[in-house]
Amino acid sequence: MNVLMISPGFPVEQPFFTRGLARQGVNVIGLGDQHESQLPPMAREALAAYLQVNSFTDEGHVMSVVGDAHRRAGIHQIECTWEPYMILAAKLREMLGLPGMTVAQTVPFRDKEAMKQVLDAAGIRTPRHASTRSADGVRQAAREIGYPVCVKPISGAGSADTHRVNSPEHLEEILPLLRHVAEVSVEEFIEAEEFTFDTVCVNGEISFFNIAMYRPRPLIGRTNEWISQQTICLRDPGQEYVRPGYEMGKAVLKALGFQTGFTHMEWYRKADGEAVFGEIAARPPGANTVDLMNYANDFNVYDGWAEAVVHGRFSQPVNRLYNSANIFKRAQGQGRIQSVTGLESLMAEFGDHVCVVDLLPVGSPRRNWKQTLRSDGMVIVRHPDFETACHIADQFGIRLQMYAG
């Protein structure tokens, strides 16, 4: 069986998904826009063959390359776990007559307005919303919805180009920052805590689910450089506090007709306990959240996803042993990393609970913190007790410091 994997080596989690497919006994054919020699070793070693295209934006060329490969060797399945290429994957499936998500099924997972229209019709609580392609349209939508509003790309991922807008005057400051975005979604801003609802499904049934908490909300973290953003996967995602999000998530998957693979939903819990839908994607979460799931359960959900899409089952043991937290670090100053302080004392105090320390080494140039959540590095910690896990995460957020210059 030949499975085409789109972008097998990028972003950083992709090689693990690619290796997962190979471990299921299939021939994995990679499709990428970089030379095979530039792939990470894990991805390269998992591939039976590799197809290089000039650019994923040239759909005609991509379809020609994939069509030729199909005629030569046969392609039986197409997988994509990266947001920008979900529609392309659906078009390739339709071209080759392969099973999996079609374009019509994929669009509501990419177009935030289409997504919310489906869920509105199913009676699911969404923020009041509108989509528009013009500055005047944004102004009108904001007036009708009422401030504050959230303005973001209609098909974006994460919190890139996402803005809370508090007033008409504030909107005029934000509009120039959105000139490169073709279409935006204007939504009611929900004052609430923000969580995820992530699943691996098989034939429309949830085989594994995860709920993670963002500390603070990503929109706050993305607009304040000093914040060490955290994601915490809950050891007990079935607890009453997050139960409304779990029930909403099941209803969302049913309304959208999702069948097999990974999903990543974001939702809000208001102070009164009401759950409000945020958005959903038919792919795994990014920013190493899949790794958090692994550390929370001591299993391998990369392989679990691959087993689900190839064999239609999920046999990874779901142990739910820990709360696991990711702390993303941003250096103070600009230029190259000059020093890292606090790590030695933190490891002496909490080392037994630290899973990963992945910081830019001294001498490395800083990353653009506005373009990547991983910023200048991360630490992953875990603990069976939620409050203790939060305390450890906060200590790494406060005491671990990186300096650039």
Image (cartoon, rainbow, N blue to C red):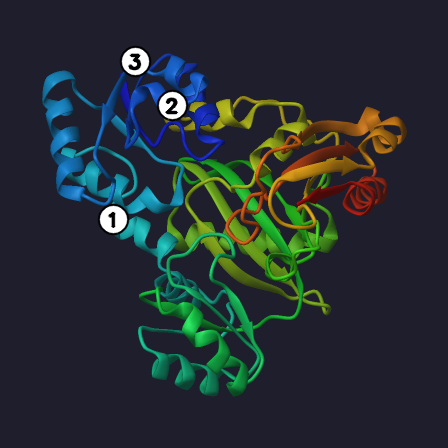
Residue appearing at x 36%, y 54% in the figure: 110
Which residue is farthest front?
A: 405
Query: Mark 1 near mark 3, Cβ–Cβ under 8 Å?
Result: no
- Residue that badge 3 annotates: 48
Q: Amino acid at mark 2?
A: Leu
From mark 2 to mark 1, how far is it between C-alphas?
A: 28 Å
Q: Position of residue 237 (x, y in %)?
A: 68, 43
From mark 1 to mark 3, how far is it between C-alphas?
A: 27 Å
- Residue that badge 1 annotates: 103
Q: Nearer the viewer, residue 94 or 396?
A: 396
Circle 1 residues within 10 Å: few <14, some 14–19, many ≥20: some
Query: Mark 2 near mark 1, Cβ–Cβ under 8 Å?
Result: no
Q: Amino acid at mark 3?
A: Ala
From mark 3 to mark 2, how far is it between C-alphas?
A: 14 Å
Disc on the earlier residue, 2 or 1: 2
Q: Quadrant of residue 28?
A: top left
**Depicted 174 relative to depicted 156: above or below:** below
Lateral position of residue 158 relative to residue 310, left or right: right
Q: Position of residue 331 (x, y in %)?
A: 68, 46
Lateral position of residue 112 relative to residue 221, left or right: left
Q: Amino acid at mark 1?
A: Val
Q: Nearer the viewer, residue 37 or 125?
A: 37
Query: Mark 3 near mark 2, Cβ–Cβ under 8 Å?
Result: no
- Residue that badge 2 annotates: 39
Element at badge 1? helix
Quadrant of the rendering where the N terminus is positioned: top left
